[in-house]
Image: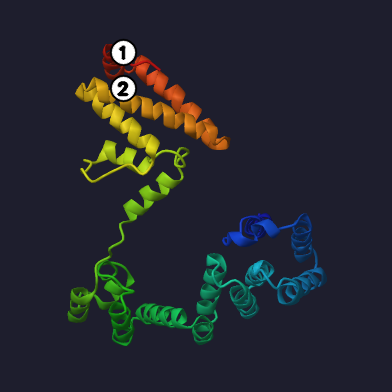
Amino acid sequence: MRKSLLAFILFFFHIYPSSAQNREKIEWDDLVFYERIILDYYSSESEKKHALNELDTRCRWKDPGTGLSCANLAILYLNANDLDRAYTAAAIAYKKEPKDNFYRNLFQNLAVRTNNLKDMRKRMGRDGNIILTYERAILRCKENRPTAALPDIRTLVNLGHLTRESLEKGIFAQCLNNSEEIVQLRNIAKPNKVSYSKLLMGEEDRNHGYYSIWDISYARKEKTEKLKDSDEPNQLITKHWMDFKSNLISGNSAKAKSSFDDYKNTLQSIKKSGGKSKDLAESLELATELILKQDPIFRDKADRMGIRW
């Protein structure tokens, strides 16, 4: 089970690296190579040593543009509980691709576990300073040394890296335990302006199947919130449909017919672009026809106005 799990981890990060720019560079030979490394690693001690040496050579000399082999090497060393070598391999992976989230997190985690925080700070520059300060504060809190942790916590608050909410619950709130110092820090800490619920809704909107042609965010707001006069759809097809719906419900026959014609013409334009957009437009045509024929409000009002699909 342990063997198959590790094989999956290595395979997963080879096929789906967190940095997408190298995804197209992956070759079948690479898959064969990593499969052989894993099999050798779990064969015998001599084969295991040979596999690590071969992967180490590839990490250092044969993959100049990607940190993938180094990250895999770090995972294998981590599995063998050789933390120092795991850290070295992770550091090389981070050096090769510093913008890759997985490589950066692997490097940071191993820096903490191997107490290489100063080296991490040197390699990461200003970001390393912040992480070092954060990790040191956490360490001192875990050691039940709130007085020693306080200067680092204060620094993080002053730099805006700790918000008011992070001082109300969690390790720092427990560490300072509603002391006078934490009350003062809460007063000067900035509130968290990030709405995670809005971030989630935005992500869901972007993953919606019709996102490329329809304003999903506007449609959701129409159902769940009261739209403002200044709110306008950012997709023309959505605007024409909303205009048609509004004019139809209000009984403005002339404007309803005009906006419905605009809606149909826009659908035809989308269909001409071909590909996925054409398929989506054809689905909208079918949905529109069903609404006009089956929805009691749309059907009755459209019939009286002489609007047909």
Binning the other alpha carbons within 10 Å of mark 2 as few (below 14), some (14 to 19) or many (20 upward) gives: some
The image shows residue 200, relative to residue 264, as above or below, that is below
The image shows residue 66, relative to residue 238, as above or below, that is below
Q: Label 2 is placed on what type of residue?
A: Lys
Identify the residue position indicated by label 1 in the image. 306
Q: Position of residue 267 (x, y in %)?
A: 45, 30
The image shows residue 58, relative to residue 291, as above or below, that is below
Q: Would residue 247 appear left or right of 213 to someone viewing this image?
A: left
Identify the residue position indicated by label 2 in the image. 257
Q: Position of residue 17 (x, y in %)?
A: 61, 60
Tag 1 near tag 2, CB within 8 Å: yes
The image quadrant where one finds the C terminus is top left
Asked where in the image residue 253 lies, by quadrant, the reply is: top left
Q: Of residues 306 and 25, which is closer to you in this image?
A: 306
Q: How far, Cα to Cα, is label 1 from label 2?
A: 9 Å
Judging from the image, what secondary structure is the residue with disc 2 in?
Answer: helix
Q: Label 1 is placed on what type of residue?
A: Gly
Q: Position of residue 183 (x, y in %)?
A: 18, 76
The image shows residue 75, relative to residue 240, as above or below, that is below
The image quadrant where one finds the N terminus is bottom right
Mark 1 or mark 2: which comes first in sequence?
2
Report the number of numbered marks. 2
Judging from the image, what secondary structure is the residue with disc 1 in?
Answer: loop
Q: Of residues 231 and 35, which is closer to you in this image?
A: 231
Please give the name of the residue rendered at 38% of the width and 29% of the height, measured from the top-left corner: 263
Q: Would residue 81 appear left or right of 262 to someone viewing this image?
A: right
Please give the name of the residue rendered at 70% of the width and 59% of the height, measured from the top-left corner: 25
Q: Of residues 111 and 124, which is closer to you in this image?
A: 124
Binning the other alpha carbons within 10 Å of mark 1 as few (below 14), some (14 to 19) or many (20 upward) gives: few
The mark found on residue 92 in the picture is none
Q: Position of residue 5 (x, y in %)?
A: 64, 56
